[in-house]
């Protein structure tokens, strides 16, 4: 039995970084900024450990699939939701991390607000 593995790369979009900053602002009234940042960084670390080993181990986003979008996977942990896509080109796998939100936030509303602010 032969086995091989291709390199896996991880790319965080500007959208992810901007939404992370907004998420910290959104959650800070309910907890200290330090605590929110620590929680978010811990979730990102858990996410990276999982997807760098098994990029397809996280399910496709149920909500996005219900509206016809099947290319985004949804990682949920500790009250956070990370949406990402996986691209394989035969020589490697690239994981593009697009958003991070609170699980309580409506992803559609978050993205509409984001587009209004940044587009």
Image (cartoon, rainbow, N blue to C red):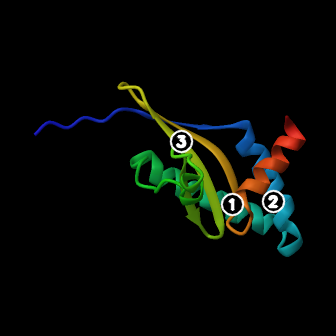
Which quarter shows the N terminus? top left
Q: Relative to 110, is 60 on the left or the right?
A: left
Tags 3 and 2 touching, CB below 8 Å:
no
Cα separation between marks 3 and 1: 19 Å
Q: Residue furthest bottom?
A: 30
Residue 53 x/y as whole percent: 40, 48
- The reply to whether callout 2 and callout 1 are in contact (CB within 8 Å) is yes
Q: Which residue extends farthest front?
A: 67
Q: Is residue 14 above or below residue 89?
A: below
- Residue 79 circle label: none
Q: Nearer the viewer, residue 34 or 118?
A: 118
Q: Which residue is mark 2?
A: 24
Residue that appears at 74% across and 41% down: 15
- State the separation of the CA atoms marked 3 and 2: 23 Å
For mark 1, what is the residue? 40
Q: Which residue is mark 3?
A: 85
* Pair 3/1: label in front: 3
Q: Residue at x 86, y 38 (%)?
A: 118
| Dot 1 crowding, Cα within 10 Å, few <14, some 14–19, many 20+ | many
Quadrant location of the C terminus in the rendered image: top right
At x 54%, y 53%, the residue is: 65
What SS does tag 1 mark? helix
The secondary element bearing badge 2 is classed as helix
Distance Cα–Cα, label 2 vs label 1: 8 Å
Q: How many marks?
A: 3
Q: Mark 3 or mark 1: name the one nearer the start of the chain.
A: 1
Q: Nearer the viewer, mark 3 or mark 2?
A: 3
User: Farthest residue in the left direction?
Assistant: 1
The image shows residue 113, relative to residue 96, as above or below, that is below
| Vertical comparison of 81 with 13: above or below | below
């Amino acid at each position: 039995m032969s086995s091989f593995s291709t390199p896996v790369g991880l790319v965080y979009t500007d959208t992810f970084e901007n939404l992370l900053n907004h998420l910290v602002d959104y959650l800070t009234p309910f907890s200290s900024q330090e605590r929110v940042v620590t929680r978010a960084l811990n979730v990102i670390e858990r996410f990276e450990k999982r997807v760098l080993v098994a990029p397809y181990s996280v399910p496709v986003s149920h909500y996005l699939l219900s509206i016809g979008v099947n290319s985004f996977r949804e990682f949920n942990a500790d009250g956070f939701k990370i949406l990402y896509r996986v691209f394989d080109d035969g020589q490697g796998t690239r994981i593009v991390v697009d958003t991070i939100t609170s699980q309580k936030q409506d992803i559609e509303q978050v993205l509409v607000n984001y587009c209004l602010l940044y587009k």
